[in-house]
Image (cartoon, rainbow, N blue to C red):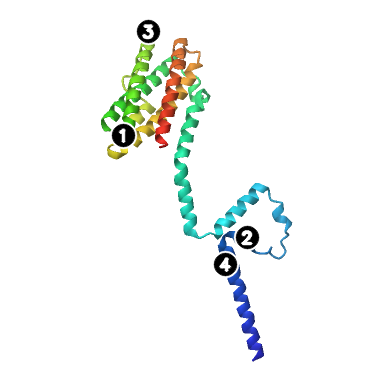
Amino acid sequence: MNKMILVSVLSLAAAGAVSAQTATDSSGGGAAATAPAAAGTSADSSSAMPPAAAGGDASSAGSAGAPAGSSDAGSAGTAAGSSDASASSAGAAAVTAGATNPEMANLTAQQFVEMAASSGLFEVKSSELALERAKSDDVKAFAQMMIDDHTKANKELMTIAMAKNLPAPAEPTGPAAEHMAAVMAAEGDGFDAVYMEHQVKAHAEAIMLFQAQSVSNNDADLAAFAAKTLPTLQMHAEHAQGMGAK
C-alpha cells in the first residue's frame, strides 16, 4: 500500500512539473529560453554564436512560444503597414538609378529620340484617358499636369529631331506601349490605382533614359534637352510616388 501511495505521489509531481514547464513556454519565453541545457551540451556553445545570430534565435524562440493566431495576425499587420513604405522606397530607388543603368549607357541619338518620344506620348495619351475615367480629383489634376508638361516637352523634342532628320514614332512603342495597354484596360474604381502605378514606373524609366542622355556625347542638342527636362521628370515622379503612398 505504501509503495502504491509513493508511486502516485511521484506521478502527480511529474505531471505538475510538466504543466509548469508548458505554462512557462507559452508565456513568451519559449522552450529554448527556459529549459536547462541538455545533457552533454556545453553552456559555452551558445556564447560562441555571433550576437546577430543569437538575437535571431531568441526572437525565433519567442515567436515559437506565442499562439499561432496572434503570430499570423501580427505578421499580416506588419506586412500591411509596411507595404506603402516599401512601394515608395522601391520607386525612389528606381528614380535615382540614373545613368548607371548599362542598358542606357550607349544609346544612339536615334534610339534616344524613339524612346523619349514613346515615353512622352504615353504620358499625354494615358493622362487624357485619366481625365475621362479617373474618380479622384487629385488624379485628374495630376493628369492635367502631365498633359501640359509633356506636350511642351514632346514639341521641343520633335523640333530637335526633325532638324536632325531623326524619325520619331507616332504612337508609344516598347515599354511605353505596355504601360498604355495596362492603363487602357483599367476601368471603374480600379482605374486610378492602375494609372498612378504606371505613372510611377514610366517616370522611373524616363528618368533613367534622360539621365543617361544628359551625359551622353552622341548629340549635344539632345543632351541639353535631356538635362533641361530631367528636373521636371523628377518632380513628376516624386508627386506620383507621394500620391501612391496615401
User: Where residue 15 appears, x then y in whole percent?
Assistant: 59, 75
Query: Which residue lies under the disc numbered 4?
Result: 23
Q: For the residue labelled by badge 2, is the local secondary structure a helix, a strand or a loop?
A: helix
Q: Earlier in the sequence, mark 3 or mark 4?
A: 4
What number is the disc on residue 136?
1
| Along the line of sight, the residue nearer the viewer: 2 or 219 | 2
Dot 1: within a 10 Å radius of its alpha carbon, few (fewer than 14), some, or many (20 or more) residues? some
What residue type is disc 1 on? Ser
Residue ID for mark 3: 163
Amino acid type indicated by mark 4: Ala
Q: Amino acid at mark 2?
A: Ala
Mark 4 or 2, closer to the camera: 4
Label pair 1/2, CB-CB below 8 angstroms: no
On residue 32, which mark appears? 2
SS state under label 4: helix
- 34 vs 222, left or right, is right
Q: Quadrant of the N terminus?
A: bottom right
